[in-house]
Amino acid sequence: MPHLHVALVTERPEASLIPILQLRPQQIWLVADRQRRQAAERLHILLQHELSSPTRIRILDDLPENDPQRISSYAARLADTLQQQRASTPGLHVTYDLADSNKLTTLLFQQAMRHCDAEWLYIDARAGTLYRMDPEFQPTSLQAHAIESVLDIDIYLQANGRKRVKALSDSTTWQTAAGQRKPLTRYLAHQADKLAGLMGEFHELVHGKGGVIEEPSPREGPRLNTAARQQWLGHPPRFPCTDALTQLNDAGLLEWTSDQPRRVAFPTLEGALYLGGAWLTEYVWHCARDAGLAHIACTAHILDLSGQHNGAPVVSDCLAMHHNQLLFIECLTTRPGPEACLSQGLRKLHEIPEHSAGLAGTSVLIACGEFDKAHQHLTDIRRTQGLKVEVMESAALKYLPDHFKSWMESGRWSIT
């Protein structure tokens, strides 16, 4: 049976893709207003690539904005055109999806589409369900179908005008090295509340002024500052920090001995990057993989396809997709001291919405620092300021696998 599908393009263009990529209609009409015209054009290009060549895709970019009377008239004219299509194409099945349109637009289109016998589709991504209902909205006609996993990270980004050009985790060399360090990485994360001061000091020694890593030029990656390979800890370390230092020395990531407990040296760029914070990103990657996430990209460079904001490309610590939902994770290893932790953490919390490029999904900040010594935790600040970012601090890192599993099952980050 020939199938024509009408999709309203909204602020979440990726949502329109789910029923299209699952049902694969022979004809697709993308309806957009002037503000969504570019989004409709992106979807057109993407669908041409993802669907078979006989698929016919049409863009209708004259949807009125913010005027109920004109929107109603437009929807009625569209329904008339669809009815003519049904009359000229025997057996034509028409469906429509309004994505996350506002309530008034939804009601106006639902009323109009009854006149062309179009079937209404509704996607509940969190529940993983695609609902279908007949033109008269009879409750007995309601059908529920499981949503297929049709979106990956790259499709999701492209629908939103972004492109992932590279990610460290794409490299088999990176994956092999991270795999070899997995027991050590897991140890550091599970002891993060006790090692937070040491790891924060490493971050400062590596990335701070005159640190082990030189500031990279726009065209070059980070370089090891050979003159600053040797550094000194602020205080002689105690257990369990001495145990961590011994393990890092045995792994070749750091040079340390108990004879000179304050002296540390960074023999390689890889070791410096790891101790400067990459260990936390690797831990997130391991936990995501162990939880069964199929789509995950760490240290991913994201470009704006419009070319307007590529002077400083977004570099995401971790992007993950599961069942068409996006997870955006930023990692933070703070300088030593509770006040430094809070100031850095608060700045990161406010940066995440902009850093995530407006992508809809779950945003999480995973932070290692001495927050337990502060009067107010980041989680409290997030709640009081209404920031839509979930927060995990040092002592909770050992529960990260449980959070991944909860998110995969329910679309929610909390395990409580």
Image: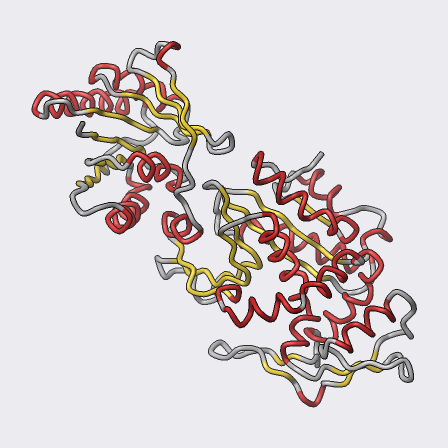
Provide residue 20's location: percent of width, then percent of height.
31, 37
Provide residue 259's location: percent of width, then percent of height.
91, 84
Provide residue 297's location: percent of width, then percent of height.
51, 58
Q: Residue furthest left?
A: 88
Considering only vertical position in the picture, is 81 above or below 238? above
| In the image: residue 369, left or right of residue 80 | right
Q: Report the quarter where the C terminus lies.
A: top right
Q: Report the quarter where the N terminus lies.
A: top left
In the image, what residue occupies the spot 45% across and 28% down?
A: 129
Residue 379 vs residue 245, the one in the foreground: 245
In the image, what residue occupies the spot 26% across and 24% down?
A: 70
Considering only vertical position in the picture, is 127 above or below 388? above
Instruction: Determine which quarter of the picture holds residue 242.
Output: bottom right
Instruction: Determine which quarter of the picture holds residue 254.
Output: bottom right
Provide residue 13's location: percent of width, then percent of height.
37, 41
In the image, what residue occupies the spot 39% across and 60% down?
A: 308
Considering only vertical position in the picture, is 247 above or below 324? below
Residue 104 vs residue 186, the one in the foreground: 186
| In the image: residue 215, left or right of residue 312 | right
> Colour scheme in the image?
secondary structure
Residue 68 vs residue 123, the one in the foreground: 123
Considering only vertical position in the picture, is 235 above or below 315? below
How many numbered badges does the structure rendering display? 0
